Image (cartoon, rainbow, N blue to C red):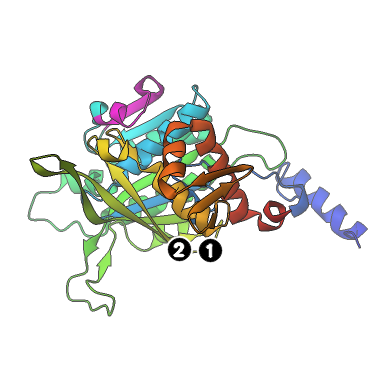
Amino acid sequence: MGLTAEALALVAQVNKKFGPETMITAADMRHVPPFASGNLPLDIILGGGFPANKWTEIIGFESSGKTTVVHKTIANQQAKNPDFSTLWVAAEDYDIDWAQQLGVNTNQVIVAETNAMEEAYEIMLDFAGSRSVDAIVLDSYPALVPDEEAAKSMDELSVSLGARVTNKFFRKAGKASKRSHLVEERPTMGIVINQWREKVGAFSPQGTPKTTPGGLGKNFAYYTRLEVSRAEFLDEPIPGKGKVRAGQAMKFKTIKNKQAGPQKTAETHFYWADSPSRGITAGNFDIVRDLMTWGVYYDVIQRRGRYFDFGDRTWDLKDAIIDSLRAELDLQDDVAAAVLQAAFNPEEAAA
């Protein structure tokens, strides 16, 4: 059964009055793929990557890896599309050396250094509406200062000023980020980095009660809210000299996710220094560890005692397949693609 003639007539009438695409059939809406982060565990729990034409909040305590995750996502997108461009609103300093070490082509990044909240939001809205960049990043929200607060003296109250301005931004951002559902248009990935704050005087059975600056209203505007936290530090052995700290285990949790199930968790290992024992250079995730973990989990890599199978290849012992994964980039891509297929399209993967 299709739509009635009366319903179609009303749709046409509304579109004529308010503009094309005011109303369309859901089946006619284009699917816009998400922006893959390049980190397999993160992409799995996000539903393929960060949502397109929507806004994502990345939250965490200090030094948890929030900015690193965004840089690595941009580097991954640039690797697939050298023309991929980013607007980076730096309410805090933009570290060009760190960005380049993480693989970012900084020639494709426009940096706006400002901590004036209204100015930052106006710039973000202008670029979102112009369709001139592929990603918009704010790093980070707590460093922004509303104009009204900046004009006050230190002893004057300024509670909730930022929350009011932020809610206004998101009311405008919906229109600026909107893209055609019928015609292909350049999508945009919007990310706002935020930080946890302890909720003084509150109680939580899960531990320290915490909240994010900016009020509660913004939480409804975000399509995805991702928590990044540090689980443990990773050490690199130095023969005859002990160990040196080389990286950290990152944990991810989707607090809110409208393109996949929420409250999903994953873990990855990131190295800010070289790890010769693992064959990892500074500024990279332990991709092979992630491929082995999720490949075996989804039966993409099948384990038979001491043997491991993938496709028409077989390895004797775990070290053998790990060596192949580290040496063969094509094999990494094939395993990652098979894992994502199994995660999101299990029927097709089984066939």
Q: Name the residue carrying label 1.
A: 261
Front residue of this view, candidates 279 and 57 = 279
Residue 82, position as x, y percentages in the image: 49, 22
Question: Which of 204 and 4 lies nearest the eye of the viewer?
Answer: 204
- Three-letter code for the amino acid on which mark 2 is drawn: Lys
Q: How many marks?
A: 2
Residue 153 visible in this rendered orientation of the protein: yes
Q: Is residue 105 magenta?
A: yes
Mark 1: secondary structure: loop
| Callout 2 secondary element | loop
Which quarter of the picture shows residue 320?
A: top left
Q: Is residue 216 left or right of residue 98?
A: right
Q: CA distance from mark 1 to mark 2?
A: 7 Å
Image side of residue 81 versus residue 96, left or right: right
The answer to the question of whether label 1 and label 2 lie on touching residues, with beta carbons closer than 8 A, is yes
| Residue identifier under label 2 | 264
- Name the residue at 9% across, 49% down: 153
> Residue at the location (73% across, 51% down)?
23
**Which residue range is magenta in the image?**
98-113
Q: Amino acid at mark 1?
A: Gly
Q: Position of residue 206 (x, y in %)?
A: 28, 76
Question: Is residue 275 visible from the viewing direction of this image?
Answer: no
Q: Is residue 51 left or right of residue 74?
A: right
Point out residue 161 in the picture as x, y percentages from the top left corner: 27, 54
Instruction: Please tell me which residue lies in front, 92 or 127.
Output: 92
